[in-house]
Amino acid sequence: MEARHWREHLPAGSVFRVEDLTARRSLTAAWAEVWGANPSAPLIYDVGAGTEARWVTAGEFEERTRLAAARFVALGLQAGDRVLWSTGSSLDAVVANVGILRAGLVAVPANAAYTSRELGHIVTDVRPAAAVVDHPDRARWVTEAATSPLVVLSVDLQAVGGGGNQPTPATREDGSPRGRTLDASSPEDPALIAYTSGTTGAPKGAVLTHGNILANSESVALTWRWQSDDRLVHALPIFHGHGLCVALYTSLLRGSSVVLLPRFDADAVLDAAAAHRATLFFGVPTMYHRLAASLRVGELSRLRLAVSGSAPLAADLHRRIGELASTAVLERYGMTETLMTISNPYDGDRRPGTVGFGFPGVDVRLDGEEILVRGPTVFAGYFERPAATAEKMDDGWFHTGDLAQLEDGYVAIMGRSSDLIVSGGYNVYPVEVEDILLLHPSVAEVAVTGTPSDEWGEAVTAWVVPDGPPPTREDLAAFTADLLAPYKRPRLLHIVDALPRNAMGKVRRVDLH
Ligand code: MLC
Ligand code: AMP
């Protein structure tokens, strides 16, 4: 079964070929062209850490990212080397990321809330040549986990640890690196390795090419009618596809402007939108839940477009915001491995409870109930895991593991074929949490599920068969503090006598509710 054709997204009368999505070869080449054409345009509003808040222009950003690229080259990093990048939102962090890409290096984003165990896994797996982190603990964890030489840098790119090669005098007079042409990556060159877990095993690195991230930004911009005079309030974490590839990279491609907030807060978002006359806001459903609970929710009507993604937006929350703020939130769907694939239309009916149909150039079909997608944003594969890649790819089609029905050609997500929990837009793998909880001396057996929650979408829930006196939620929270990022820790705890099992002895999570 097929969803509506992506041509329905195109503006009336427009001429579009799928090849157009990658015609500019790489995002960095396209960015440099856009910034060069209008260097005085405001690009990023830096709320400043200890400095005065101000607009950074396209020309200034181009220069700063060129110098950042030169810094990486000066450290001896070679094109294709991997750079771990784990930091909260700040102008410096964005400059570092863009500098990595402009120098032809591969950025490896990692959640800044990860514990040493979680970050250590990525470091061991991806063997970065350098790391950019914004906290001394993370600098230490990265250094301790490294199995090959690496240099650890703060977000302003000062060396704070590790070894690595000696810096060489490396910049020309204009600040560009010697011996390296900037923005020279080809569409098939890797740009990002984004870690994401399957249903089993540890997180795997999804390799996204320059062609993937360019096609994603081109199709998002086209579909949502993104123009250079748009202004985005950015309150998403910058280390995941939503905040990085959709929000930030596409703003940079259009040469439009971004107000970069360090974290989400409903009042701060609405204040920033009012103060800077913003036109765009992107969020996960938990953010819309909090905005809808604010007396100021009506202010969303001043935006040109509010987009929701990363988790299901409940149809009644969608309708409530429509009534309170006279705005139809546009819901879209994507994944780390495929970037953005399905969207409600900009012009036309944005249907609550559905994610719409394929972005321009993305083919979507259902195999039974499972969503399959194919197109220029689908990744190159999992880093050094051909078997895992082969399991997911079938003749160019990526198996998403998400289940859906078609309603009048619109995709309505019904669930997942796996036990993945999505809490506030973050993925949580029950097996990972279970493995950690089993280490607690009072836990004999455990199963982890997601309980429906208005605020979080799903709340991580532990079902524990105790060994001796039952543990409390606080016991488990304290125990997991150094082992699991906060969003993976159980919010709900049920003490039970036994877990439901099938004839094979496997726990039936579906029976736990
Ligand atoms: C924070 N907490 C969470 C949580 N986020 N718990 C469960 N699930 C989450 N997602 C914890 C905090 O650590 C804290 O724990 C407690 O909840 C309350 O914190 P808070 O201050 O109220 O939360 P806040 O920091 O405001 O975070 C909520 C949030 C955040 C919604 C702003 O989770 C967020 O930014 N989510 C976006 C995730 C995202 O970008 N996903 C995109 C993936 S890419 P304690 O113990 O201290 O009380 C992707 C592809 C695609 O999926 O399609 O986009
Ligand atoms: P991630 O691997 O972190 O990128 O998460 C991708 C997963 O988020 C998808 O497989 C879906 O399960 C979920 N997801 C993303 N967007 C939506 C949406 N609009 N509705 C429902 N689920 C979504």
Image (cartoon, helix red, strand yellow):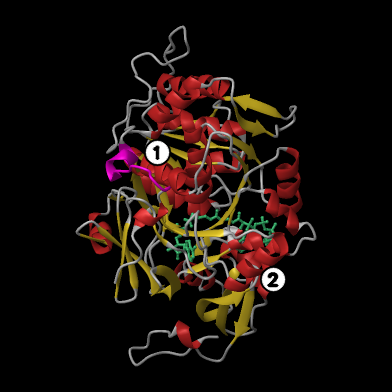
Q: Is residue 15 magenta?
A: yes
Q: Position of residue 32 (x, y in %)?
A: 44, 24
Name the residue: 34% across, 32% down.
24
Which residue is found at the position 39% from the left and 54% from the top?
359
Can you name the residue that lies furthest to the top here?
Answer: 173
Residue 167 drawn at (x, y percent): 44, 18
On the image, which quarter does residue 164 sit in? top left
Q: Left or right of 212: which side holds 310?
A: right
Does label 2 or label 1 sit earlier along the sequence? 1
Residue 37 image offset from top left, x and y in percent: 48, 21
Above or below residue 278? Residue 179 is above
Going by the numbered disc 2, the residue's amino acid type is Glu
Q: Is residue 419 visible?
A: no
Q: Which mark is residue 474?
A: 2
Q: Residue 26, percent across and down?
A: 35, 33
Q: Quadrant of ligand 1?
A: bottom right
Left or right of 289 in this view: 311:
left
Q: Quadrant of the C terminus?
A: bottom right
Which residue appears farthest toward the right when viewing the image?
295
Q: Nearer the viewer, residue 252 or 493?
A: 252
The residue under the point 44% across, 71% down is 413
Residues drawn in magenta: 11-22
SS assignment at label 2: helix
Circle 1: residue type: Pro
* Rendered position, 239 above or below 41: below
25 is within the stretch colored magenta: no
Q: CA distance from mark 2 to mark 1?
A: 36 Å
Count of marks overlaid on the render: 2
Q: Residues within 10 Å of mark 1 (few under 14, many from 20)?
A: many
Q: Which residue is mark 1?
A: 128
